Amino acid sequence: MLNGYLITFDGQHGVGKSYMTNFVSERLTSLGYQVFTSKEPTDTEIGKLARSAEQDFTGRTLACLFAADRHQHCKLIQEKLSEGHIVLCDRYLISGLILQNMDDVDFSYTMNLNEAVVVPDMQIILYADSDVLNERLKSKQTSRLAQQEQSEGYDRYRHHKDELEKCVGDIAYMVNNSTADAENIVNHILQELKQREAKN
């Protein structure tokens, strides 16, 4: 079995990160894996502060708040990994890099703030067609950065692909328009998990 495995889901607002986190969690749990789900910003006091501060602060100030939340979050992630859990995280460092970059913070500054955070074993960027996203976002409230992310769409994640991979390593880009796509993502994860188990 695995000795802990961190999988992160990133991508623009409304692409289905929360849905995918729950979908994968249910499937892996049914197969006997220990799974722990989490998200960023967290529901801790510092995570709530970072989320609410987005309306009043920008740039490096906000980047520091989100990084502080991530460092605190990593203590919990590390604990769950040490217990042998597969940790599924709805948004992580990739989202931080993109959102802070939209706020005029360069990648190198954000990476320096996030030095020593837990490195994911698998990083997935989700994307979906614009009509699908528009339908999903009809009833969602959006923050300042989420609105900007929504207006720019998937392009910023795609445009900065090479820079992102230089910062964080390999990334899987997976479409999430339908249940069939969700099944494909689960199959991709299961294949990677089995390869990891075989090595152990």
Image (cartoon, rainbow, N blue to C red):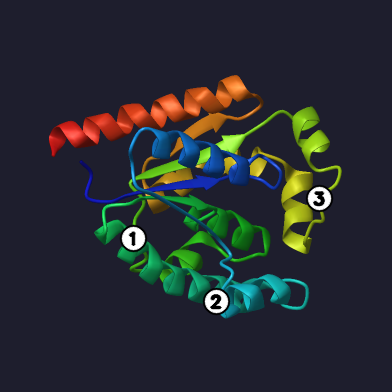
Asked which quadrant contains residue 48, the reply is bottom right
What residue do we see at 59% from left, 54% from top? 98
User: Against 77, is 183 above or below?
Assistant: above
Where the N terminus falls, by quadrant?
top left
**Dot 1 alpha-carbon crowd within 10 angstroms: few under 14, some 14 to 19, many 20 or more:** many
SS state under label 3 = loop
Q: Nearer the viewer, residue 124 or 37?
A: 37
Around disc 3, counting alpha carbons within 10 Å, would you say few (fewer than 14), some (14 to 19), or many (20 or more)?
Answer: few
Amino acid type at image mark 3: Lys
- Residue 7 vs 142, above or below: the answer is above
Query: Which residue appears at 26% of the width and 58% of the height?
Result: 83
- Is label 2 or label 3 in front? 3
Picture quarter with the C terminus: top left
Q: Which residue is mark 3?
A: 140
- Neighbour tally class for label 2: few under 14, some 14-19, many 20 plus, Cα within 10 Å: some
Q: Earlier in the sequence, mark 2 or mark 3?
A: 2
